[in-house]
Image (tube, rainbow, N blue to C red):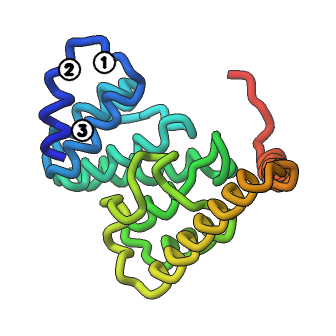
Amino acid sequence: YAAARDILLPLSETDYAKAGFYDDILARTMLMLGNYAEAKSWVLKANPRLRGDTRRPLDRFNASDAALLGYLELKLGNASVAAELLDGALAAIDGTPRVGFSGYGLLDVRIHAVRGRRNEALDAFESAVDEGIVSNVFFDFFDVDQDPLLASLRGDERFEAAREQMRSNLAQMAERVDAAIESGDWESLRERTRAVTGLVARRWSGNRPEPRLE
């Protein structure tokens, strides 16, 4: 992480910094180095809508960063602000899909863990694995084994069992892809993808709130 910081920071005034993930990666790098105030500044740079003390506009598009900001506020001793952000992020993803491009992944697990709601976090993690989540990187750059928001769960028997199932599911996915490459038959894999995508779409449409005119 120190090496990543030393490489990335000098690029802040170059075109590289215009990449959409530049601020996000620096925020998480600073967090892992324990530089919480600096990490907070990079989160806010990436998400200026999260600035301010009240009425933060939280939605499913910034919920993950709001939760990360809440974790940082907790580390900085701002418990009430942290609670506002974490619980607001959890409310923002209510009724939205967990899996898929627009899904929230393990965000509920991470928020419950940071808030000290151990049983709720473990229940959500087991549910996430059952629904097909095999990685957190797509959703928030952190691997499950390094994510600081999940630190309080590691070592728990339920967490480790679900984590092992996640690894097994990922290995099975890799085996299916290898088999398709070897045989040249991709149709069964495409059909499996269509089935899963359709299931997610039906769950999402069933939970989607009625549109509102603002």
Question: Mark 2 belongs to which amino acid?
Answer: Leu
User: Which labelled disc corresponds to residue 40?
Assistant: 3
Kindly state the secondary structure of the residue where label 1 is placed: helix
Q: Which residue is drawn at 15% across and 50% down?
A: 33
Structural distance between the alpha carbons of marks 2 and 3: 19 Å
**For residue 183, side relative to residue 1 (left or right):** right
To which residue does mark 2 refer? 11
Ranked by sequence position, the earlier of labels 1 and 3 is 1
Residue 52 appears anywhere in the view: no
Q: Residues at badges 1 and 2 in contact (C-beta under 8 Å)?
A: yes
Judge the density around disc 3: few (<14), some (14-19), many (≥20) Cα neighbours within 10 Å: many
Judge the density around disc 1: few (<14), some (14-19), many (≥20) Cα neighbours within 10 Å: few
Q: Where is residue 186 in the image (x, y as percent from the top left)?
A: 81, 49
Q: Which residue is drawn at 87% across and 49% down?
A: 187
Question: Mark 1 belongs to which amino acid?
Answer: Tyr
Q: Residue at x 19, y 43 (%)?
A: 30
